[in-house]
Image (cartoon, grey):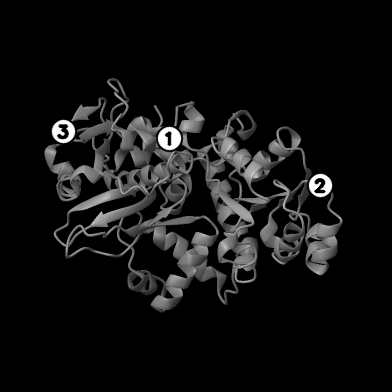
Amino acid sequence: MSDLRIERRLRPILLEALRESRAVALLGARQVGKSTLARSIAAHEHPARFVTLDVEATATAARTDPQGFVAALPGSVVIDEIQRAPNLLLAIKERLDRDPARGQFLLTGSADLLTLPTVADALPGRIDYVQLWPLAQAELHGGDGRFVDALFENDLPQLSDAPIGRGPLAALLATGGFPELLEVRSARGSARFFSSYVASIIGRDLEDVADVHDPGNVERLLYAIAARAGALATFHGLATDLGVDAKTARAHTEILERLFLVRRLQSWHVNVGPRQVKSPKLHVADSGLLAFLRGADEQRIADDPEVAGPLLESFAAMELVRLNDWSQQPAQLFHYRDQKQGEVDVVLERRSGEVAGVEVKAAATVSAADFRGLRNLRDRLGDRFTAGVVLYTGAATLPFGDRLTAVPVSGLWS
């Protein structure tokens, strides 16, 4: 199976943005399929010339004379890996200011352009940003991808024969969603891919987004974050692990976020309780990468609940991030924990004020105690609370009281 045969759910959203905005930036980590999607769109629905800055000679020309480079581009253009020549964005801004036509540029980037200091203020109101993550399970399995919408409609998947236990999920968690790994690869081959992937990003892409004295510290931080996946992130703790100060740990974490390797979930604390824990959670963006960083293979994930639990939580959180990106009314994603250890792994809040919660358990059974944090949210929020779900590794969807439901993990894509 290859990425070319899988329909990306963001495609219609990207096309809508091209119809409505002068320029669109498609952002995401390396190897998630940005160039493949952009090439396909440029060859079919939105004809455009394709220019990649991954070719060093082209990137050098773009950096040397950005105005001349942009002036020589006729009609609609795709510029791939724009972060390699960020000053191009200022030249693009000048062109967009002169010409209000829609869909002039589709830019792809392996770094978050909004955080690059040279371009942060270059294109407000002139460019739409669309984010592409590794493949979601709904894309891989052909599911409807409506789980986030279903949370707010309280119309959850009703399953009765989902695979039971961690074992059936182990291969899925260990593989992740990078298109390159959808081809047949041995366990050693997958490890080689992830090792090379991390090395190439630290060795090449890092310099596009930050001036870091010791790139090795950024790589070590990625491993440290992976070791703490599913736990609260304390920058003092991460700093201690690395032997640096907390300010450096925080700055390096932001770099990993810019490269789309790490996704931060801030604490949700809007008028729920007086003593809430406000530390964020940090999730590695892909479960296969997380398993590699933690040194866990498929068998270990199946056999060891101490490994499977954090992996499954990060996997589910990032699946919700992906599903939310193409939902009808995207929500903001948070986590919640109070000082009495009441917690919800993912809290979703829409602009309308509606709130839903998701808790993740690696066990094949679920009890009323597993809904404690969700009940707390429901009781405090009243009608604002639409649904609380415990995702677990059992077979069936089960009701657990008013707006509370246990759903097999495969409900995320079934």
Q: Quadrant of the C terminus?
A: top left
Q: Is residue 320 left or right of residue 383?
A: right
Label disc, if present, on residue 328 of the rendered structure: none
What residue is rendered at 65% in x and 41% in y?
A: 19
**Crowd band around label 3 with a 10 angstrom C-alpha radius: few (<14), some (14–19), many (20+):** some
**Crowd band around label 2 with a 10 angstrom C-alpha radius: few (<14), some (14–19), many (20+):** few
CB atoms at circles 1 and 3 under 8 Å apart?
no
Which residue is at the far top? Answer: 161
Percent x, y for residue 22?
Answer: 68, 51
In this rendering, which labeled residue sits more in front, label 1 or label 3?
3
In this rendering, which labeled residue sits more in front, label 2 or label 1?
2
Q: Nearer the viewer, residue 76 or 195?
A: 76
Percent x, y for residue 265?
Answer: 37, 56
What residue is rendered at 29% in x and 20% in y?
A: 161
Q: Quadrant of residue 315?
A: top left
- Which amino acid does the dot numbered 3 rest on? Phe
User: Could you tell me how far apart the alpha carbons at marks 1 and 3 are, in whole angstroms?
Assistant: 30 Å
User: Could you tell me how far apart the alpha carbons at marks 2 and 3 are, in whole angstroms?
Assistant: 57 Å
Q: Is residue 79 left or right of residue 409?
A: right
Label disc, if present, on residue 75 of the rendered structure: 2
Label 3, secondary structure: give it.
loop
Percent x, y for residue 226?
Answer: 40, 56
- Which amino acid does the dot numbered 1 rest on? Ala
Q: Which residue is denoted by mark 1 in the rendering?
A: 171
Label disc, if present, on residue 400 of the rendered structure: 3
Whichever of callouts 2 and 3 sits on the residue coming sooner in the sequence is 2
Percent x, y for residue 16?
Answer: 60, 39
- Which amino acid does the dot numbered 2 rest on? Gly
Label 1, secondary structure: give it.
helix
Q: Quadrant of the N terminus?
A: top right
CB atoms at circles 2 and 3 under 8 Å apart?
no
